[in-house]
């Protein structure tokens, strides 16, 4: 049982897919463009993490995500995790092997490296000071690839900073704190389901070495590396969506049923 309360949305029909978002993100922000594509063939269940700064525990968050899925009729499902959500998904797969039938992990880590921990510590400090403008600067510096940020006009950069500062999700500080301590290295060899791990070559927040470590640790996992920075759904949505959908479709053919 878990005392963590999640806000859950459900759409589509078919075999279930459960979404796990990243720190400082949300279901709409991380998966908004992917959800309608998934919903053509799947029941899509997305749960936003708590919107307050109650201390989060990885086990409890994984339990809450699975409980939300089960509460909406999903006996088994594929988990699609982004960033922090990859650690949540991995932990859920280990704790509920009878339910999780596949994993898609993007921009994640087995354990946050020094740069990632320094970045999320700065997030926490900025939010503790109530300085959302500083938080927005930190997000653009690490969350997006260098080429993407440098391609923005002065006006576009100003607008991106303003939008980020005005839309900091509740609970971001607690989620950042979980990034700093989450460690799923010991979980990876215990996973026995099909997995696609997607690294992002220009990721300045979660170095692609972390995604490669995930893939190396999961027996039989596929690894794909896309160009660009951490926020793949903004920088290269088409390539990311195509990779996720292709993996799900291929899993159906190879197993004779949907692995979800």
Image (cartoon, rainbow, N blue to C red):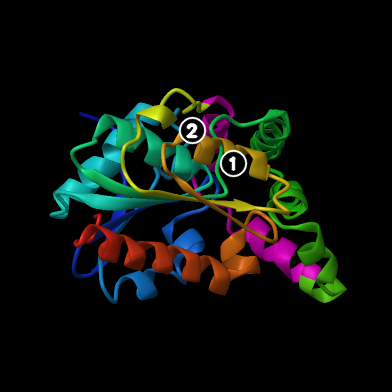
| Residue 5 appearing in the image | no
Assign the magenta stretch its main secondary structure: helix
Task: Give the mark, 1 or 2, whose residue is nearer the N terminus.
Answer: 1
Q: Which residues are magenta?
A: 157-181
Verify whether residue 175 appears in magenta.
yes
- What residue is at 56 percent from the left and 65 percent from the top? 233
Q: Is residue 227 above or below residue 193?
A: below
- What residue is at 32 percent from the left and 49 percent from the top? 102
Task: Tell me the quadrant of the picture where the C terminus can be found.
Answer: bottom left
Q: Which mark is residue 217?
A: 2
Q: Is residue 142 left or right of residue 128?
A: right
Dots 1, 2 in contact, CB < 8 A: no
The image quadrant that residue 252 belongs to is: bottom left
Task: Tell me the quadrant of the picture where the N terminus can be found.
Answer: top left
Q: Which mark is residue 187?
A: none
Verify whether residue 78 appears in magenta.
no
Give the x, y percent position of residue 245: 40, 68
Q: Is residue 61 above or below residue 231?
A: above
Q: Is residue 240 above or below residue 187?
A: below
Disc 1/disc 2 C-alpha distance (Å): 9 Å
Q: Is residue 139 above or below residue 53?
A: below
| Residue 223 appearing in the image | yes
- What residue is at 25 percent from the left and 67 percent from the top? 42
Q: Is residue 87 left or right of residue 93?
A: right
The image quadrant that residue 161 belongs to is: bottom right
| Mark 1, residue position | 212
């Amino acid at each position: 049982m878990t005392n963590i309360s999640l806000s859950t949305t459900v759409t589509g029909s078919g075999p279930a897919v459960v979404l796990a978002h990243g720190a400082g993100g949300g279901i709409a922000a991380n998966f908004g463009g992917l959800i309608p594509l998934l919903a053509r063939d799947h029941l899509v269940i997305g749960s936003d993490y708590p919107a307050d700064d109650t201390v989060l525990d990885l086990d409890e968050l994984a339990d809450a995500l699975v409980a939300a899925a089960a509460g909406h009729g999903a006996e088994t499902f594929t988990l699609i995790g982004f960033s922090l959500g990859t650690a949540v998904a991995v932990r859920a797969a280990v704790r509920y092997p009878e339910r999780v039938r596949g994993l898609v992990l993007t921009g994640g880590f087995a354990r946050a490296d020094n740069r990632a921990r320094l970045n999320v510590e700065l997030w926490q400090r900025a939010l503790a000071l109530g300085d959302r403008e500083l938080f927005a600067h930190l997000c653009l510096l690490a969350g997006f690839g260098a080429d993407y940020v440098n391609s923005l006009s002065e006006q576009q950069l100003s607008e991106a900073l303003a939008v980020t500062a005005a839309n900091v999700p509740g609970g971001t500080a607690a989620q950042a704190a979980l990034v700093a301590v989450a460690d799923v290295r010991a979980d990876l060899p215990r996973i026995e389901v099909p997995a696609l791990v997607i690294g992002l070559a220009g990721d300045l927040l979660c170095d692609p070495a972390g995604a490669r470590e995930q893939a190396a640790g999961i027996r039989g996992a596929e690894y794909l590396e896309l160009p660009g920075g951490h926020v793949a759904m903004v920088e290269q949505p088409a390539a990311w969506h195509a990779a996720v959908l292709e993996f799900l479709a291929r899993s159906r053919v190879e197993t004779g049923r949907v692995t979800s």
